[in-house]
Image (tube, rainbow, N blue to C red):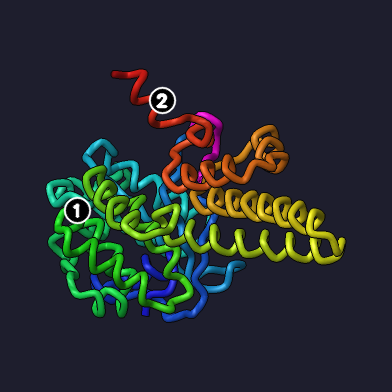
Amino acid sequence: MFTDQPRLAVEILRDLMNIELPETPLVQEEDRTFNTRISDDIEPDLVLTLGPPPSPVHAIIVEIQKDKKKDPRQLTRYAAAAWLMLRCDVSVLVICPNQADVAHYARPVESGLTGYRLQSHVLGPDAIPAITDPQEAAAHLALAVMSVMAHGRDRKVVEAFGAALEETRNEHAPKYTEYAYSMAGPEIRRLLEEIMTSTDWPVYSPFAREHFSRGLKEGEAIGEARGEARGEARGEARGEARGEAKGEVRSLLRVLAARGLDVPDDIRTRITNCTDTTQLETWVTRAATAQTIQDLFNDPDEDHQGQG
């Protein structure tokens, strides 16, 4: 059963594409930078290893390609660099949201080195089922993520995915929308946002929602504890306010971390020193869709008006 992102790649290769991989419960993400010189650019999207970290038995390089811009020969460099560094067999998995791009990456790649020909495993929309049943989506959440990526223009696919996330108790469920959103095209992203914002939650991402809720509860608990300790209504109110702000700060930092956004020291100081809960709530909401850390502080409405 699918459990998390590393497992997702393993399950795609083993169960969806019938590729033989070593049987091991140990799967972990590796450093994806293979640079040997500053001028080199050898950094795939994701590198996983199977087996114990000191001596892995297999490596998987995962590339998500939304167009034909990458030279397939670059994939041979990734595989060769991984083999040299990890000293184990390597599979290359290329995920293409557009079927038109599959053939570009599926053909064998001649490296120019005698005897070294790379055959990538390429997964396109035609090999991914369109899941429109919420129960089926809940039973196979990781496959449902791929279904959203490939067939998300069909509203029923996204609705089934959203319903599955609301009902499932899978501990990894909050991460799945982050995966779906990151792999989907602009049109599907807009539909995801529309469906996820149809609830009362202040942010559409389940991962962000989980941490927003947790941080808010922590903040309320801290505020209540401090207020009760003072034994005064005024002290209680102040304690609750500070606790709520602190909870918002924690929520914001968690969401930024989940989105993979680097937070410079000056920005972190600005966030942690903020006691305005309304402002913090605004930042948490923006963090769910921010592409850069500066997007937190840019008002989309003002930007839109300025362009009009």
Q: Which residue is mark 2?
A: 302
Please state the horizontal and vertical placement of residue 149, each as a whole percent of the image. Answer: 25, 56
Residue closest to the eye, 192 or 36: 192
Up/down of 295 relative to 146, above or below: above
Magenta extent: 33-40
Residue at x 73%, y 51% (from the top left corner): 242
Name the image quarter holding residue 243.
bottom right
Residue at x 27%, y 38% (from the top left corner): 71
The number of numbered discs placed on residues in the rendered structure image is: 2
Mark earlier in primary sequence (2, 1): 1
Query: From this viewpoint, is residue 59 visible?
Result: no
Please state the horizontal and vertical placement of residue 299, each as a whole percent of the image. Answer: 45, 30
Please state the horizontal and vertical placement of residue 37, each as a whole percent of the image. Answer: 55, 34
Residue closest to the eye, 250 or 221: 221
Residue 220 is labelled as none
Distance, label 2 to label 1, CA atoms, is 45 Å
Residue closest to the eye, 239 or 185: 239
Query: Which part of the image, by quadrant, shows the N terminus?
Result: bottom left
Name the image quarter holding residue 128.
bottom left
Q: Which residue is mark 1?
A: 106
Up/down of 27 relative to 109, above or below: below
Residue at x 29%, y 39% (from the top left corner): 70
